[in-house]
Amino acid sequence: MYTAREIKPAIILSFAWPSLLFYLVYSVCLCSLNYFGHLAIGFSFVPIGLIGTAVAFYVGFKNNSSYERLWEARRIWGALVNASRTWGTYTLSYVKTSSPISDMDEQQLQTKLIHGLIAYINAIRIQLRQKSVWNNSNTTAHTVVKGGHENAPLHLLLSEFLTEQEVKYFLSKKNPATHILKSQATLLDDIFRKGGINERFYVQMMAIVQEFYNQQGAAERIKNFPFPRQYAYFSKVFVWLFILVLPFGLINEFAKLGEDMIWIAVPAYMIIAWVFNTMEIVGDTSENPFENAINDVPMTAICRTIEIDLREMLEEKSIPPAITAVDNILM
């Protein structure tokens, strides 16, 4: 997630310079054919204007749909934050026992339930950031965030909160996060059956488990179901169709002002083409909000916030610092 109020010109240029160079060369070549070659290549701007209007509506629809996916993803992670804090509070308030359960005392049980949840949340994050078939990780939106951002592998993260045997077991599963939460529910059930928590509180905590699964499933739906390719692909096709025919209309319009005025079509074309192409790129980089790109949901920072909150509830001393933005990018 980009955190600065204004986007740095260097980032904009990194997106724009290949396209701007093409627009410059393309428009100069066409203007040269008209000016030096005396070829009447311009034609009425009316059909081009109609195409531009249609493309603007189409790209607007795509961008709105992309934003909805991004915003839903952020709401899912907001719900995970709320559920995590509730889980921590319920664990410390409800899990009270004077007799050992599963060879652990009260504090050990509370710590295991909370540490297990931290491992679960981080497992979701790492699973969601796995590369999709339809995702292009070579775009500028990805390359600008490759350096300076924490991206620890799953086994190292789990090792901080789980035993070696547990880590090995969970990593053997296709969906480790699902099984981590299942083990939390199993432990909670064991506590309940041995009298460590009363039935009403047990039901409330199991409802939180259900909420976690609901939000995990919602995030996986966004991750595993791509933005419909017929909208994404043809949006790009229509934008570039408009960009390629646009200079012919501009040359015709500026030629009406005088033979030398057709060169004004070059900067005019570059500006208009850049605007349409940028609208397309904005939507394209918002389609998949879990792909470790510049516009994605800052899952690493959210997971660290959850970890800090829960470990402070446990009164632990060695608590890691909050994740901060690197070059105005928060991951």
Image (tube, rainbow, N blue to C red):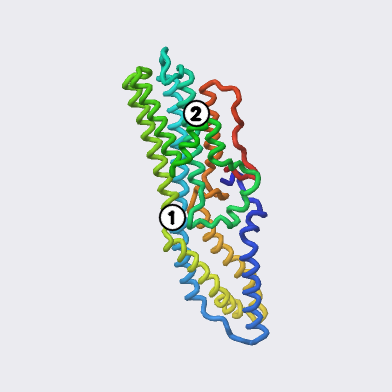
**Left or right of 109: which side holds 143?**
right
- Taking depth in this image into account, of 152 and 257 the one nearest to the observer is 152
Q: Which quadrant holds residue 263?
A: bottom right
Q: Position of residue 187 (x, y in %)?
A: 40, 26
Q: Amino acid at mark 1?
A: Pro
First along the sequence among labels 2 and 1: 2
Residue found 48% across the figure and 33% down from its top: 166
Q: Farthest residue in the bottom direction?
A: 38
Report the amino acid beneath label 2. Answer: His
Q: Quadrant of the C terminus?
A: top right
Residue at x 56%, y 55% (from the top left corner): 137
Q: Which residue is mark 1?
A: 226
Q: Which mark is residue 115?
A: 2
Give how far across and how far down residue 190 sits, in percent: 37, 24
74 or 180: which is nearer to us? Answer: 180
Please give the label number shown on residue 93.
none
Q: Give percent across and percent down for residue 49.
A: 49, 71
| For residue 142, above or below residue 23 | above
Q: Regarding mark 2 in the picture, which secondary structure is present there? A: helix
Indicate whether 85 appears above or below 219: above
